Image (spheres, helix red, strand yellow):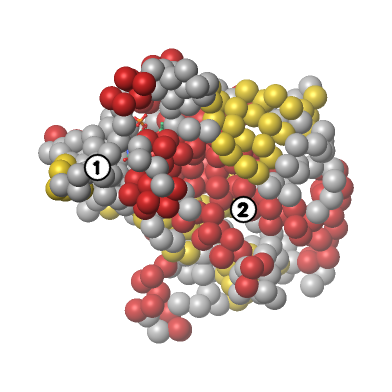
Amino acid sequence: MFEYFTAGESHGPEITAIIKDLPAGLKININNINKQLKRRQQGHGRGGRMDIEKDKINITSGLREGITLGSPLAMNIKNKDWTNWEEIMTVSNKGNQEKIKARRVAEPRPGHADLPGGIKFNHSDLRNVLERASARETAIRTAVGSIAREFLGEFEVEIFSHVTGIGTVKSPTWQKVKAENNINSITEIKEYFAQVDESPVRAGSDQATAEMINLIDRWKEAGDSVGGICEIIVTGLPPGLGSHTHNDLKLEGQLAAELVAIQAIKGIEFGGGFKLAERPGSQVHDEIFYDDKNNKFYRKTNNSGGLEGGISTGEELIIRLPMKPIPTLSKPLKTVNLDNKTQVEAAKERSDNCAVPSASIVAEAVTAIVMARAFSKKFGGDSIKEIKNNYNSYLKQIKNY
Ligand SMILES: Cc1cc2nc3c(=O)[nH]c(=O)nc-3n(C[C@H](O)[C@H](O)[C@H](O)COP(=O)(O)O)c2cc1C
Ligand SMILES: C=C(O[C@@H]1CC(C(=O)O)=C[C@@H](OP(=O)(O)O)[C@H]1O)C(=O)O
């Protein structure tokens, strides 16, 4: 379930997705999808393109009266910038050759797919690579994730994110925020993340927000870019998603594969992350307790980030992702011209100089897709009703474990 494809170029007419196999009976709220698309477009450090695009989803099949049929769901987002690129990006064979030539990219940008993609596909115009490598594609992926989110919402699973670092400026990670502010209930969690949504850098405090904005602006003035770290939190998960029984069934691996594949994301940490390697085991592994009132096992710490042996423990899932600095620089790096092999400056394209806040929304969406797949695998069925029955029966079963 939740197998999907995306297609579309950054400056083409539209970006498209087809989700092959959704369960029937899932209510899709278009406003919720558009809300996620809007969240992804925000954030301090974005470039001129975000002033042009006003992303709205258009679902063309797979739904009747807002409810899934169980058949493939197709949808698209129009690129408003297409009107400015039509002659260059024409899908017919009547392109304006002069304009196409003028926008040819022959000076590969370090850090982009330009050079390896050009070599691999034998393109002499690197625009043929960058159009698809561009993170414009993450808009439609966010829409796919929004549908996964609607599905998870049926089971009261919620996904949040915040930015915990921009360059050298840090903001507390979730476990610290939670402990320091004594956040326990889902209402309190939502309150904290509602405040994060108000910050132009998606940070948890006014001080971090101000410092991060300042840093982004300073690098922009210098013609440079900056990366950072975002943290994703999933609440409401049952224990038992994923499996220890085979490498490809482990949830860590599935999350890592999908999340690290987001443009410019260069690694992944779960829970206590890389720092755990510095500590003895007694200070790392989360001791196990039993809550007699609610008949459930629980932990007082969550260094595992909610996963043991590739299986969800029932605690919050906690993931951190480092994003490298944006590779297109207005003060470009050295590169080599494809035609005469001379040393030149890399091509300059209009660009963001920081997109970590946007990447955190994309990461929420991608996490939703992986978790929806894990849910479907464990509680599978053709309709929401059937999946819910299976889910409720499992919850009963584990109360007696
Ligand atoms: C939301 C988002 C926005 C991005 N915006 C830009 C941009 O404006 N300019 C740019 O050069 N790279 C941008 N990137 C990063 C590039 O798409 C990415 O670095 C490039 O495709 C190479 O892929 P890799 O970094 O995963 O190796 C953005 C990434 C994300 C997630
Ligand atoms: C269009 C989006 O992001 C784009 C991702 C991107 C890149 O190279 O990845 C380059 C920029 O596009 P342009 O070259 O048109 O200015 C970003 O704006 C988007 O997020 O919707």
- Specify whether 221 is left or right of 348: left
Q: Is residue 324 visible?
A: yes
Q: Going 82% across and 69% down the picture, which residue do you hit? A: 400
What is the quadrant of residue 215 in the picture?
Answer: top left
Q: Is residue 228 visible?
A: no
Q: How many C-alpha atoms fall within 10 Å of the one at disc 2: few (<14), some, or many (≥20)?
A: many
User: Where residue 356 sits: x, y (%)?
Assistant: 36, 44
Q: Residue at x 38, y 70 (%)?
A: 274
Ligand 2 picture quarter: top left
Q: Amino acid at mark 1?
A: Asp
Q: Observer-nearest residue: 6 or 35?
A: 6
Q: Residue furthest top?
A: 83
Mark 2 or mark 1, whichever is nearer to me: 1
Residue 259, position as x, y percentages in the image: 50, 54
Helix, strand or loop at mark 1:
loop
Count neighbours of disc 1 (C-alpha within 10 A) and say few if under 14, some if 14 to 19, many if 20 or more: few
Determine contact: label 2, label 1, CB under 8 Å: no
Q: Residue at x 53, y 74 (%)?
A: 286
